[in-house]
Image (cartoon, grey):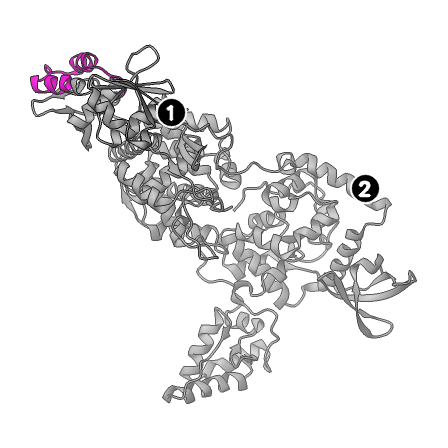
Amino acid sequence: MPTIPSPDPAAPTAAGAGRAPTLANRSDAELAALLRARPDLATPLPGSLTALAARAATARSVQLAVAGLDTPHLAVLDAVVALDALLPAGDGDAPGVPEATLAVATGLAEVGDVLERLHALALVDLVAADPDAAGTGRRTSPAPGVAAARPRPAGLAVTVPAGTAEPAAAVAAAADLPAAARRILDALTWGPPVGTFADDDGAGASSLTSAVATLTERGLVRRTADGGVVLPGATALALREGRTHRDLAVAPPTPAAASVGQETRAAESARAALELHQHLVALVEAWGAAPAGALRSGGVGVREIRRTGTALGAPETTTTLLVELAAAVGEIGQTHDEDGALWAPTHAYDDEDVTARWARLAHAWLHSDRAFALVGTRADDGALRSVLEPGLERGWAARLRRRVLLALTAWPDGGAPTLEAVTRHLAWETPASPPPDWAVAAVLTEAAVLGVTAAGALSGAGTALLGSGGPGRERAEADGSDEAGGSGTVVAASAAALAADLPPAVEEILLQADLTAIVPGRPSRVIEELLARTSEIESRGSGLTARFTTASLSRAVESGLDADEILATLTDVSRTPVPQALEYAVRDAQRRHGGLRAGPAASYLRSDDPGTLTTLVHERDLRLRLLAPTVAVSELPAARLASLLRGQAQAVLVEGPDGVVVRTETTTVAAVPRGSRTTTAPTAELADPEAAVARLREADARAARESDPASAVAALREAVRAQTTVWVTVVGPSGAVDRRRLAPLRVQGGHVVARDVERESDLTIALHRIGGVTPA
């Protein structure tokens, strides 16, 4: 649940002994803490503290606050709601439920701290006991709107009147129930309190009917309109012997889990991070040569993702995650050509090392508001959700990732809990809104792909990404932000943690006569770039195996490398001499690419063989015009012309303006996106809660001098809650003013339903017709 400071006992949080406190009575620090813990109250900032209290009492706001409560806090809140509705008032008609009663009902040894935090969240009202009265401890009652948002607290039907028998008599009557009736009563006692029965003409129908009839006759249950039965809350509470909860878990469950050693975690995390980086490099190369077409929605189609996955040698789910994260950090972006929108690399981060690049991807994953697991599922209109399309944003996505990683820290270092154990842990933290299993499973899968987890346990890099423990971590858990120091600090720490897990880079390779190269470890950046340009990678793992092929060497020459440069670099990094077969293959590749040379003019094509040019001039797609037997020009750019020629199995080199062969990969480059797909920043009000509180105080002071409709509504709600009468000034359609003494029954839908005390009749008044409300 959100971490908020406990109320200051010396602060003016209560109007006095026996009186329920209001938000206006709270100190500025407490109000600022409330706005941080319940940000929906300040989005947008209401006009006054009265309006803030009204918003805090709405069902939606209460449900949002309740959704963040852990099991003990929710249990105490439900106990307050249930006992306040079911138990008679205490001595002297003092309002609220005593703390001691709540402790007995929930089975918790101490509920004081829990009540203070619920009070700080404006979910309960704490009333100090009269020091002159008998008894000690405070009394508590539900804050406005809470009881309506929790209609069946702790599985008790609190709004259902008791049966014909009083609860105590009903318990006595339950002592000798028939077995069938006893089973039904036991099932209803601890909830849910409602039972329905399907029509059945079989042998068991008469037995069931008889059991229900017995329970009804003894006043234990009441019939419902649909033919079922409901167990009244007062009766259920008596059957529970005053307990609202049983076997309440005061700590999150952490069942025994497998333990993963530090060396294994480091190796697995490094392997996953290196593999992700290699896939990212391959993605940049693949989409640089052949950009991915964008759908009308802005996303990337299934076929394009499958093609990309094949080129990367990665599963479709990994490809989907990689593409989404690459877009989030600006590795790829949108550009346009004559055919429409395209997704292409920006090449803005190509020079970064492995650790820095990985850390940016991992940080974007943790804080992205996009639910990547929704890709491939159907939207409400039946359309298939695609990669990078708008609409995958979910407010819970970033919070759930952080919660899952924090849950892993509940186990001892190296603990690798199962999916079921993690979901149970998370369900304890937010029992009112437990995350679905599929979402938790998706987070764990993505964390494993990134190397944030290793063999199911949190890795060192993942721990650094999450941040250190202590108060900073509690704040990050509450609002989803980074640790103090900013995101740059967390990214740098994550990169450093990964660097510590990576094996040392190998600066040498072993060249073999079968045209293969072996790197006994993690290749250095120089070796990795060399092999990427000149060879085909056959296997990765603890080492790397690459093979020099005709196609790979041709690609190297086409990229601007010449034979002497390739051989000189191989000689420098090889522990063994360059095999003669490899030297022949490199020089042969350069000889094969000496026939055709393209250059800008817009482009030209020249050849030593006039017949070759004569044939190519007739290819309409090339747009060639013969200038001389060995020279032709084209309207197409040189890189595009070379790409088309290679598509026709023609070996061609591209020259620069100075005639020197240049590296051409026919790449398309997109601009670096200005924005990123990460969690949005907080609103201006939440950025400075203290300033927001000051504005609310000013508005309240102004409302005291002027007529404030929100104050009238708040007074009506308080009268409904306290069951008191008020004087209401009603303005008629003609402008006539009528003053009536009313007992408000409910305020909803822009109207107040009240009973006219003097006329003894009920009436409904539109709120905009009310000119003022004063105590009777």
Residue tagged by mark 2?
A: 701
* Principal secondary structure, stretch drawn in magenta: helix
Mark 2: amino acid: Ala
In this view, the mark in front (2 or 1): 1
Q: Nearer the viewer, residue 39 or 524?
A: 524
> Mark 2 or mark 1, which has the lower sequence index?
1
Regarding mark 1 in the picture, which secondary structure is present there? loop
Q: Residue at x 36, y 18 (%)?
A: 600
User: In the rendered view, does 91 fall on the left or right side of 230?
Assistant: right
Report if residue 467 lies within the magenta region: no
| Residue 366: numbered disc | none
Q: Which residues are magenta?
A: 559-588
Mark 1: amino acid: Glu
Looking at the image, how many numbered discs can be counted on the residues? 2
The spot of residue 229 in percent (x, y) is 52, 78
Can the viewer see residue 231 in this picture? Answer: yes
The spot of residue 441 in percent (x, y) is 36, 49
Looking at the image, residue 556 lies above or below residue 44: above
Looking at the image, residue 69 lies above or below residue 574: below
Mark 1 burial class by Cα count in 10 Å: few <14, some 14-19, many 20+:
some
Residue tagged by mark 1?
A: 635
Looking at the image, residue 661 lies above or below residue 262: above
User: In the rendered view, does 763 fall on the left or right side of 261?
Assistant: right
Q: Quadrant of residue 12?
A: top right
